[in-house]
Amino acid sequence: MIQIQAALFWAYAVGATFALSAGRQLQVWERINAGEGPRTRSRAANPYLALTALFAAVLMVPTGLFLLWQNPSWSTMHVADGHEGVWAGFVLFYAGGLPVAAILGFLVAQSLVLVGAGYWAYLQCVGGYFLLFGTLIHGWDGRGHERFLSPGAEDFADWPRDSVVNHVLDFLTSGTFLALLLFGAAVIGTMLVTEIGWLMEGWSLPGADEDRAVPRFLAIAIAAAGVHGLPLAGAVFASVLVRLVDGWLGLPLFAVVAGLTLLHGRSPVRWLYGLVGVPARHWRAGLDEAGGQESDGQESDGPGGPESGVTADRPG
């Protein structure tokens, strides 16, 4: 349901965010399957990955294709004037690329969560959403917001000759905005409910209360601000820098500021991330602790070895 140039970035960010939201469940999933057969450990058996792919295929792809058919000019950021300007192979690439990008984002973030690098999984979400918002706000020519707020090619061509207020009003009263409003309620609503639901599901697992340092409502607000609000602010800041000092200086300057904000050991973003309660340890940490406690009296492959540590964490 978003313009084609930004759609893959959004799909990747959604997949990474889903994996981060279900980080604790994914670790438990790996621990439960540690001693079982390869069929159970297959990627296809992961319910969270399957639901992520289903979300992209059932919600993101159809709504995007509908808007591409209804208003090809807006959907292509006015690169194409109509249906004849859209190559059929590009539509196929778009329809297949969204689920692939969502799955890729999920798998990358999942791999980072499982090795205890949850903060780097969070950076996958930030990076994807930054590219999404950066494309919509600045674009490749500094006119991304103009392309987004112009429902038709004529509106985009007339942008310099009319006021911003009139362009915004025209967009808010267009059929494209109405479609975005309806689809957004379904797609974004389902996305947020899934992310919040998986976070709360993870907090109900053993050890979650020790990692989460704030009440649940505040943790959800911090997570939303960090995943969605911070990349939006970063995209606006980057666009302003590029407009003020040109791209050759603005982008390197923004990279320095972003690096200090996100990667410094005492970054406030790192501190806020630590309050939410996403697991920060390797998924085998619980197994190692269980195995170490019982290895004094029994062999590691006996009834009291690591296998008992795995089954001890099974729900129910």
Image (cartoon, rainbow, N blue to C red):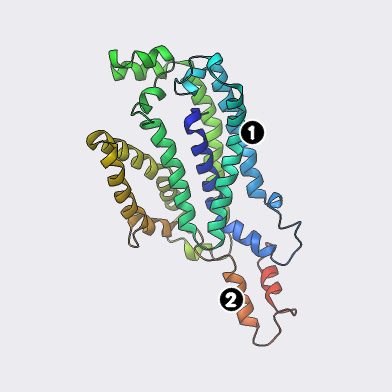
> Is residue 162 visible from the viewing direction of this image?
no
Please tell me whether residue 163 is drawn above or below residue 29 in the rendered image. above
The quadrant where residue 235 appears: top left
Q: Earlier in the sequence, mark 1 or mark 2?
A: 1
Which amino acid type is shown beneath numbered disc 2? Glu
Give the residue displayed 31% in from the left and 55% down from the top: 260
Considering the numbered disc 1 on the image, is that residue within a helix, a strand or a loop? helix
Amino acid residing under circle 1: Val
- Residue 58 image label: 1
Q: Which residue is mark 2?
A: 289
Between residue 311 and residue 5, name the one nearer to us: 5
Which of 82 and 200 lies nearest the eye of the viewer? 82
Q: Position of residue 103 (x, y in %)?
A: 60, 44
Measured as percent of width and height from the top left, residue 255 is found at: 33, 48
Identify which residue, 15 or 182, lies in the foreground. 15
Furthest residue toward left: 244
- Contact (CB < 8 A) between labels 1 and 2? no
Position of 277 with respect to 202 (left or right) is left
Please state if 54 lies on the left or on the right of 81 as rendered. right
Residue 155 in the image, given as x and y percentages of width and height:
38, 14
Q: Bin the neighbour count of mark 1 within 10 Å (Cα to Cα): few under 14, some 14-19, many 20 and up.
A: few
Q: Give me the C-alpha separation between circle 1 and circle 2.
A: 41 Å
The spot of residue 200 in percent (x, y) is 54, 52
**Residue at (57%, 70%) from the top-left corner?**
285
> Residue at 52% across / 30% down in the picture?
185
Q: Is the residue 260 above or below the residue 84 in the image?
A: below
> Callout 2: 10 Å neighbours few (<14), some, many (20+)?
few
